[in-house]
Amino acid sequence: MPEIDFLSIFQGVATLVAAEPTIMLARIVLMLLGIAFVWLGVRGTLEPLIMIPMGIGMTSVNAAVLYLSGTTMGTIFLDPLASETTQLVDVLQINFLQPIYTFTFSNGLIACLVFMGIGVITDIGYMLIAPFRSMCIALFAELGTLLVLPLAVAAGFTLKEAAAVAMVGSADGPMVLYTSLILADDLFVPITIVAYIYLSLTYAGYPYLVRLLVPKELRGIRMDPTQIPSVTAAEKVTFAVIINTLLCLLLPVAAPLFMSFFLGVVIREAGPKPFVEFIGGPVLYGATFFLGLLLGVLCEAGTILNPKVVMLLLLGILALLLSGIGGILGGYVVWLTSGRRFNPVIGIAGVSCVPTTAKVAQKEAREASKFAVILPWAMGASICGVITSAIIAAIYVTLLR
């Protein structure tokens, strides 16, 4: 009976044993981290829509390393470095996620599909309740996006990498992905993963920031719902079309994102049911699913061994912290200029992340006073946050590309 070499059969184990100690340890850590992401997603601690596929992908790709040749190790998930036409055709036939990566991920299309879905489920009428106040808050809430740029440069990142890292402060995952793909393609995987992990934690962390910076008596300020103007569908469509055209004219580099978001808004208001159900359902959730899965699959051992990743973790959380503080400062500015009738907690909603931060604002106001209803104004600030983060991303890309 011939001798059986079990390592030649179970190549995932063989490549793990044969790898350098740092690579072996990194693979094990990422497999465990992927399992943790799935568990936290299932429990609802982290966002399940993104964390479950990301965790499964991360665990699978770091377990399934095999010998592609006598000396080369790799996976058959995808090859993000394929560039020559012949090479790309070959990997499209072998690596099963390669077509999705090549045709929707590496070109930013998947971010546009997510933005289109967000537009369909977003009522832009909330923004039109108090557009100038909402935009003021959203601009303040970009504090982390602006301040982390010089800090990242000082920490050793290039200017392009620093801009991509700073975009984590926008609290907008597709925006971070789009910017990092253009400005820092060598770091876009860790930057985007860090962004989505931290965004999942904002629902747990931002309430403490609100309680720290806003006294209970101010958190409980009641807004007058009778002051909410009625906004017709025609007005929403008109606004969306004009703003989209203006933003595309001024900042064409981000035109795909602007167009996707406002197209979703117009479809929502126009009301063609098949389009609304398709874009708000299969397109949005399908794109979100594959976004998480591909991020997990791209997170191989070499990713976390980059010495910049630790600093990236610190700068990412700092960016979101500063943006949260900036948003609350914006809330205070509007509170003062409105005769102290505006609830400053709404400021935290300026940190995009629709609708999570708006829900945080409403929850904190309701805990301070059960009669405080601020969700419509908070949603307006959050929608403005999406627009301002896209504008800043476009400015960074235009100046640095």
Image (tube, grey):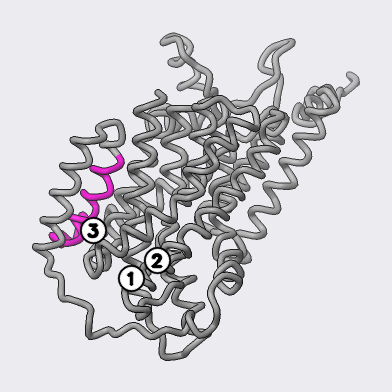
Q: Give the camera-side residue of 170 and 201.
A: 170
**Residue type (three-letter) at the residue carrying disc 3:** Val
First of labels 3, 1 by sequence position? 3
Contact between labelled residues 3 and 2, with CB atoms less than 8 Å apart? no
Left or right relative to 380: residue 93: right
Q: Is residue 330 above or below residue 335?
A: above
Left or right relative to 114: residue 367: right
Q: Residues within 10 Å of mark 2 (few under 14, many from 20)?
A: some
Looking at the rendered structure, the secondary structure element under dot 2 is helix
Q: Residue at 27% across / 68% down in the picture?
A: 126
Q: Is residue 205 visible?
A: yes
Q: Which residues are magenta?
A: 257-275
Q: Is residue 6 visible?
A: no
First of labels 2, 3 by sequence position? 3
Label 2 – label 3 distance at C-alpha: 37 Å
**Residue of label 3:** 276
Quarter placement of the C terminus: top left
Residue 106 location (% of width, % of height) = 43, 29
